[in-house]
Amino acid sequence: MSVWLSAIVYGLSTSAILFLVSIALSVGYGLMRIVNLEAMLYYSLGAYLTYTLVSATGSMWLGALSGVLVGAALGFLVETQLLRRVYGKNMLFSMVTTFSVYLIGIGLIQYVWGLNPKPVASPTDTMLRFLGVAIPLYRVMIIGIAGITYIGFQLFLNRTIVGKAIRAGIENRDHVQALGINIYRIFTLTFVLASGLAGLGGALNAPLIMVGPYMGNDMLLYAFTTVILGGLGSLKGTFVSALILGQVISIGGTIWSPLSFVGPFFVMFTVLIFKPNGLFGVKGIAFGFDQ
Amino acid sequence: MARRTNEWILPFLFTGGLILARYLFPSKMTFITEVALYSLYVMGNNILFGYLGYVSFGQPVYLSMGAYSAAIYLAYLGRSPLTAILVAILMGILVGVLMGPVLIRLRGSYFTLVNAAFCAIGLFTVERLLIGITRGNDGLWFRTRMVATPLLDIRQPRNFFFFAMFMLLVVFLLYRRMDRSVLGAAFKATQGNERRMQFMGYDTFKIRWLGFVLATILSTLSGSLYAINFGFVNPNLGENSRAAEVIVATLLGGSGTVYGPFFGAITFLGIKEIVSQWITRWELLVGVLTILVLFKFNRGVWGTFMDLLKRSRKTVVLQNKTL
Amino acid sequence: MNGYESMEQGNTPILRIQNLYSGYGNLKVLFDISMDVYPGEVVCLVGRNGAGKTTLFRTLAGFLKPFSGEILFKQRNLVGEFPFEIALYGLKYVHQDKQVFSDLTVKENLELASYATKDYDWDRVFAYLPKLKVLLQRKAGLLSGGEKQMLLIAMALLGKPSLVLMDEPTEGLAPHLIQDLTQVFKEIRKETTLCIVEQNLPMVTQIADKVYSMKEGKIVAETTNPEEIRALVFEKYL
């Protein structure tokens, strides 16, 4: 019993990180038809900055903050300088461009921090006792942060006019512009938000995994899987999908170790057969080149 | 047109050029061999990308599959390198035929991602799942098990070089044939306007399937040659991070053309060779290069060359008319 | 965003298009288009499918960059401006696709239109389109075709535009709805200039002050004479 409870909590915290990082991809494609693979760079940088700040000041939360800010700032740069030029072009452009940015980023990370993995101490080693099982407080905190983020984002999208404009833009960018709304500013804002969240995901994940130059590679696959499973452009989809895959990774991994790695892909493949647009795919968005 | 009828000479010209280069720069023989092998791999990706319009972030898995099929055959089952190559080709056919229908159904980024996932799974399989057979990261050695091949003992690097040149030439000629035939046109037409192709009565699903199979075969063939050349394989060939490289090489050379992949291979490997002597931060370069190529030279080396040729011909024709 | 130009001020055209060439990439669609629209006019564009009418509207609204030519709207050259800027200058474009933001409610759709133009005077708009008042809480995706069209017109009217471009508003609507729409246009025209692409000939004869006829990317006829309009519209199609 305790094994399963541990696994569930572990899965939930994995879901939390997946969710934070995947928002960048979901929203990037949903709103701007951009495949922004360089979000993995914000993720990695979030983790590395956390490492540096924890080593220097011992404060993990400072690290998390810097992860968010740097992610947002970089996202701003990338969106305004690079992505502006590929809007409207074949999706391949954005995919390969952003992936190149990611690669350049890895190169720079290696230059600054070197090749060796960096361990990051978690801010608290306290264990909570729940139903007779020891659960790391830190993981619970991560779950809490992700939950708050989700609620906050939902409120933003549903209650504020800018959020509604984003939802409208996901459906039809041209119509939003035709109303007189500066869609480019909305793109930038959305992109900055999502990039910051990816950075946060990296920062929060730093104590849980090995911080290495290639940490983005694995996360890329999982994030992409999460987004496709959930359906593009749907916040709820990304959330639910992250929940599911987190459990697949943890509980699946408990049953049979390789499952933690390949499980998510199989789930994605299976769902795609029945729902090619993902669980909550937003109407009008197909994830293909030809529309 | 004058150029068309002489164009069959190009495969011989380019292969001959490589042979010449090998004698002019004997120390670079390994590099030149790799150019030939990599060209095959890029030609495979070119069918997917240039002809059919599919972006795959998982090509290394097919390369790796070819390498490991040959390796496992040579390590446990047989001894003839030629048979091993055949095994790899068969593997390519098998995977192409079985996985093809599943994969080509996916459009755009779905295809890209699923291939990437496939690549990750493949890597995991050879690294950990089947470690008993593949020896994981230690690599699988079989050099000593190979026996000499008739006519030319390709176990010797000097001889393997010629074998590689021969394979390159054969594939060039076949590739060229494909491009100039209805099949090549069908590939491109399906990419451009699938509806219309269907309207004309073509089964575009089968066309794309066939393209996928051919691409896979070229990749596995290339992989098997890599394996035999080294005498061993390890999971590095199939790493996800290498997926970008083949795309860059395809773009560099000029996608959708017959000789583009060849030039892409030369350019890419050449730059890698030169640059890695100065910097070890490999990824940085690939990234910068890709952006440059995408934005500035999106016709690639060969593509730009052909454009220039077309343009210069047009001016000649015009001049003739005014005279 | 003052849209209350009256017919009396009609000496300078509110929209003047001069020698416009436009198209998509290598494909040339519009050739040497020149048009004048005076304030308070209702101008109709007729022509076969593929004649270039939608391309013209998209170019005017800023979604397509013309190859050459001038678009003067209230003496301002629109070429090169972003669509959202053009909308804020007072030129609104109602697309042909009849798409509203289906995930949002009618009220939220209108809020978006108001947000951009800072025009929250919904009563003015409801005066023309009273049916929308009861539909406010409904998800826009659940509206009928006619209701969606009404919503799109309402959204276009917010901001008091000087000129509204409407691309085939009656397409796919039942006859009684077309009648309703015609009535709505007759009301709206009192406060804003209209330029409508239409295939529905009876409606054109009812409301058009001026008709341009397009064929294969060129303007082939222009008239303000009611008799000629009737003849032209029927002749070109029979």
Image (tube, grey):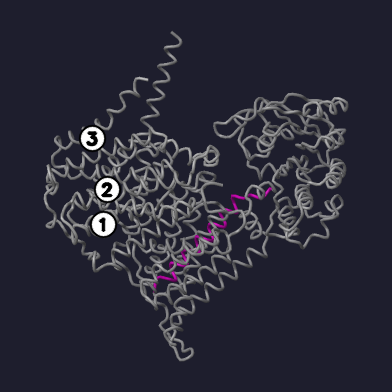
| Amino acid tagged 1 | Ser
Residue A37, quarter of picture: bottom left
Please tell me which residue is depicted at 39% across the width and 33% down the height of the picture. B181
Residue B292, quarter of picture: top left
Which element type, helix, strand or loop, lies under badge 2?
Answer: helix
Residue stretch rendered in magenta on the structure: A180-207
Which element type, helix, strand or loop, lies under badge 3?
Answer: helix
For mark 2, what is the residue? B222
Label whose residue precedes the other's in the sequence (1 or 2):
1
* Residue B132 located left or right of residue B4: left
For mark 1, what is the residue? B69
Please tell me which residue is depicted at 44% across the width and 46% down the height of the picture. B208
- Residue C27 drawn in magenta: no
Which of the chains bears the disc numbered 2?
B
* Residue C238 located left or right of residue B215: right
Marks 1 & 2 on one chain: yes
Task: Please say whether residue C134 is visible from this viewpoint.
Answer: yes
Label whose residue precedes the other's in the sequence (3 or 1):
3
Q: Residue B252 appears at what percent x and percent y?
A: 35, 40
Q: Neighbour class for label 3 at 10 Å: few (<14), some, many (≥20)? A: many
